[in-house]
Amino acid sequence: MRTRPTLAAAAVMLCAAGGLHAQPARPPGVTRVDLQHHDLSIPGREVYQLRVDFAPGSAFPRHRHPGEEIIYVIEGAIEYQLDGRPPVVLKAGDVLFVPDGAVHSAKNAGDTQAAELGTYVVEKGKPLTEIVG
């Protein structure tokens, strides 16, 4: 049982030292695969590209990113709600631009698996996702 506290303490120290960006836990049914992460030629910016899968009935709560998000829906249908805008349902092949800091949420809008390719151009060193209550 000593291993778990030691590993937890090591993870906290790595996050505090900047070795990892602390990320909120993903809700059940939402999975993420990090595809690439690079510094950009734009000073103070980095890019992440990842795949996010939504099981039927799953959703990701209201959140924001420290930069722009470019979404391409790979499969299924996903409903996006950006604060101040009506919800929009996107299907495979559709795209969405989420401005820097815009609070938004996403949920599977169908009864089959859904997935998106997310590309994030964000401030270097900041957590990629901040949950907003």
Image: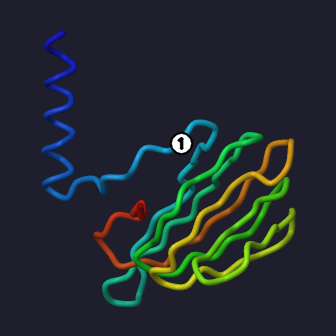
Identify which residue, 116 or 59, lies in the foreground: 59
Please identify the residue farthest to the top as the structure is shown. Answer: 1
| Residue 28 shown left or right of residue 86 in the figure | left
Indicate whether 117 appears above or below 110: below
The mark tally for this picture is 1
Q: Quadrant of residue 71?
A: bottom right
Q: Tell me the residue at 73%/72% (across/down).
A: 87
Q: Tell me the residue at 75%/63% (across/down).
A: 79
| Residue 64 image point, x, y percent | 46, 70
Identify which residue, 89 or 75, lies in the foreground: 89
Indicate whether 55 appears above or below 74: above
| Residue 94 image point, x, y percent | 83, 72
| Residue 110 shown left or right of residue 96 in the figure | right
Mark 1 nearby-residue class (10 Å; few <14, some 14–19, many ≥20): few
Could you tell me which quadrant the C terminus lies in?
bottom left
Give the labeled residue for mark 1: 27
Mark 1: amino acid: Pro
Secondary structure of the residue carrying numbered label 1: loop
Indicate whether 24 appears above or below 89: above
| Residue 108 image point, x, y percent | 75, 51
